[in-house]
Image: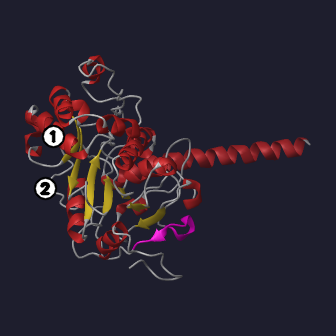
């Protein structure tokens, strides 16, 4: 018995030591991949809760009744509320409460564009967004924004782009990275499809740099709640179930949201892991796809999850069970949406519902 206890103690110490070493390795490799120190890029506070202006919205009695609470009303309730209003009443609410209407999932798409047009005109930092189809705009923190490419109200297919680290309202459309930003990805996917509306969604607080925030799931958990609400809002307004494309840390967001996400396809690219052991562990009815090109530095990140650090198995590993997306001709971590790549062609087919499960040994067309 004494020998068994000693052996058990040695095994426990060995396992604990291995776990500690692995956790340290995760942080070291993640930090070394792009030259960031592990301590950098940590401490981001997620923007959560109802949109700015909610207090004034709640106090508004102009309709002779309470307005739906942005913090508690489901998107389906919001949609039913607006369905019961006259055109004049709708536009009055836009003028009085643009920051609420513009961010209210379940509100009519055209009203949200109108409301956000007012909001961006009032904030000189985001003047470049004027005249664009802005589905959501929140200037708090580093800023969040969602832009629509195509006709969301009438398109037969919808796609959503969920970005990874270093993306906010100021960087989601930077010209120096035309295929690696949500705006660039959205534009390229829109051009590669016919009749698909694409939402470039920077709707959560992303990590900055590659540090502790990027190696843990706190920001992803907050983002998952917002992503679920987005797809609930699309369903409430009658939009088709979207294909959701999740890049880098965005795939952690999608993994945590998967079980509740109203989506027909879930596509991860350059993923560090989805906080799931395999496709079955995601508990989603969506088809799950994964892409990773040979030159993507994400391949150097250990696919482990220890003490909350790391995001688990590689979704592009056949053992994970995702459908494979061809990506051999994509380049680096942000080249998956580059024109002419097989990955972009496959993404377009997925968005339009044309891609099928590959046979054994084959890749998605």
Q: Nearer the viewer, residue 313 or 17?
A: 313
Quarter placement of the C terminus: bottom left
Q: Residue at x 52, y 50 (%)?
A: 259
Residue 66 position within the rendered picture, expressed as x and y whole percent measured from the top left = 33, 21
Please determine whether, in this image, residue 252 is positioned above or below residue 111.
below
Report the magenta residues as a range: 317-325
Foreground mark, 1 or 2? Answer: 1
For label 2, the crowd category at 10 Å Cα-Cα, with few meaning under 14, some 14 to 19 and many 20 or more, is: few
User: On the rendered structure, is 101 left or right of 13?
Assistant: left
Q: Quadrant of residue 149?
A: bottom left
Residue placed under numbered mark 2 in the picture: 175
Residue placed under numbered mark 1 in the picture: 114
- Labels 1 & 2 near each other (Cβ < 8 A): no
Q: Residue at x 52, y 42 (%)?
A: 308
Q: Nearer the viewer, residue 58 or 303?
A: 58
Residue 101 visible in the shown view: yes
Q: Nearer the viewer, residue 288 or 84?
A: 84
Residue 28 visible in the shown view: no
Quarter placement of the N terminus: top right
Residue 310 position within the rendered picture, expressed as x and y whole percent measured from the top left = 49, 48
| Spatial separation of the CA atoms under disc 1 and disc 2 | 26 Å
User: On the rendered structure, is 330 left or right of 324?
Assistant: left
- Kindly state the secondary structure of the residue where label 2 is placed: loop
For label 1, the crowd category at 10 Å Cα-Cα, with few meaning under 14, some 14 to 19 and many 20 or more, is: many
Residue 173 position within the rendered picture, expressed as x and y whole percent measured from the top left = 17, 51
Q: Residue at x 67, y 48 (%)?
A: 15
Q: Residue at x 8, y 35 (%)?
A: 121
Residue 59 position within the rendered picture, expressed as x and y whole percent measured from the top left = 28, 16
User: On the rendered structure, is 14 left or right of 325?
Assistant: right
Tell whether position 319 is magenta. Answer: yes
């Amino acid at each position: 018995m004494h020998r068994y206890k000693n052996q058990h103690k040695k095994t426990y110490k060995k396992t604990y030591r291995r776990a500690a070493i692995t956790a340290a390795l995760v942080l070291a490799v993640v930090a070394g991949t792009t030259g960031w120190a592990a301590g950098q890029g940590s401490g981001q506070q997620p923007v959560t809760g109802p949109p700015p202006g909610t207090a004034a919205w709640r106090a508004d009695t102009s309709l002779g009744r309470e307005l739906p609470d942005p913090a508690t009303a489901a998107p389906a309730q919001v949609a039913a509320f607006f369905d019961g209003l006259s055109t004049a009443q709708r536009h009055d609410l836009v003028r009085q409460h643009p920051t609420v209407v513009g961010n209210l999932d379940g509100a009519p798409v055209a009203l949200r564009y109108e409301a956000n047009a007012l909001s961006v005109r009032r904030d000189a930092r985001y003047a470049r967004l004027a005249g664009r189809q802005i589905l959501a705009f929140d200037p708090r923190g580093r800023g969040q924004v969602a832009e629509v490419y195509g006709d969301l109200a009438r398109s037969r297919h919808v796609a959503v782009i969920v970005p990874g680290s270093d993306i906010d309202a100021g960087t989601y459309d930077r010209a120096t990275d035309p295929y690696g930003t949500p705006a660039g990805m959205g534009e390229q996917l829109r051009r590669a499809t016919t009749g698909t509306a694409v939402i470039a969604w920077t709707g959560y607080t992303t990590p900055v740099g590659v540090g502790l925030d990027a190696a843990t799931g706190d920001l992803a958990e907050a983002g998952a709640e917002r992503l679920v609400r987005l797809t609930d809002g699309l369903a409430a307004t009658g939009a088709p179930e979207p294909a959701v494309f999740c890049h880098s840390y965005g795939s952690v967001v999608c993994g945590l949201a998967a079980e509740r996400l109203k989506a027909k396809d879930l596509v991860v690219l350059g993923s560090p892991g989805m906080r799931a052991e395999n496709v079955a562990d995601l508990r989603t009815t969506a088809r799950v796809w994964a892409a990773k090109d040979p030159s993507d530095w994400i391949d150097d990140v250990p696919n482990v999850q220890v003490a909350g650090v790391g995001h688990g198995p590689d979704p592009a590993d056949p053992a994970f069970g995702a459908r494979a997306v061809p990506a051999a001709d994509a380049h680096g971590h942000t080249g998956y949406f580059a024109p002419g790549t097989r990955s972009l062609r496959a993404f377009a087919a997925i968005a339009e519902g044309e891609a099928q499960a590959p046979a054994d040994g084959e890749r998605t067309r």
